[in-house]
Image: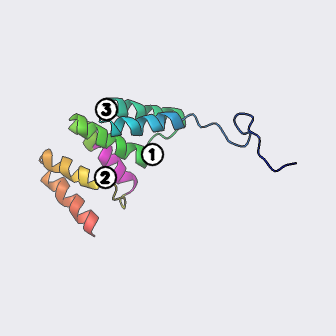
Amino acid sequence: IDGRRRSRGRAHWFPRRPWLAPLAEAHGCAQRHEHAAAVDAWAEVARVGDFEGSLHGLLRTARARMEMGDDVDAQYAFARARAMDPLNLDHMDHYAVLSRRRGGVGDLNRLARDLVA
């Protein structure tokens, strides 16, 4: 044996990940500012990968919906993410901007108090 590694296609120890391609697509769409496509791709990740209600997916979907101007669904997704993990700080600045834009002074004050406490 000469110590070289031979590749015969996909390694048998590497499990198939059907959600990986939609995940890369979702992040790519978000980076290209294709927000409607990003929302669809995040839905595909949730469906294929059995990640329904994942914090990362919810926050990214909320951000994409917010950028599309779909404030009601974005607020709902952010609220679900906050309920899932109240200690999470990712994307909460966008949630605050959305709350302010929608005129939710009470929501904005509650969010600020929760984040500072």
Q: Which residue is mark 3?
A: 34
Q: Count all numbered tags in the image, as a single digit.
A: 3
**Percent x, y for residue 103?**
11, 47
Q: Which residue is mark 2?
A: 91
As for residue 78 lying within the magenta part, the answer is yes
Q: Which residues lie in the magenta part?
A: 76-85
Q: Residue at x 31, y 30 (%)?
A: 36
**Percent x, y for residue 25?**
44, 34
**Percent x, y for residue 67?**
24, 38
Q: Secondary structure at mark 1?
A: loop
For discs 3 and 2, the disc positioned in front in the rendered view: 3
Q: Inspect this view and state whether residue 72 appears.
A: no
What's the residue type where badge 1 is placed? Ser
23 lies above or below 56: above
Quick one: quadrant of the C terminus? bottom left
Front-most of residues 111 and 14: 14
Front-most of residues 20 and 6: 6
Q: Inspect this view and state whether residue 97 appears.
A: yes
Q: Quadrant of residue 10 in the image? A: top right
Considering only order in the chain, which callout, 2 or 1, is on the residue closer to the N terminus?
1
Q: Secondary structure at mark 2?
A: loop
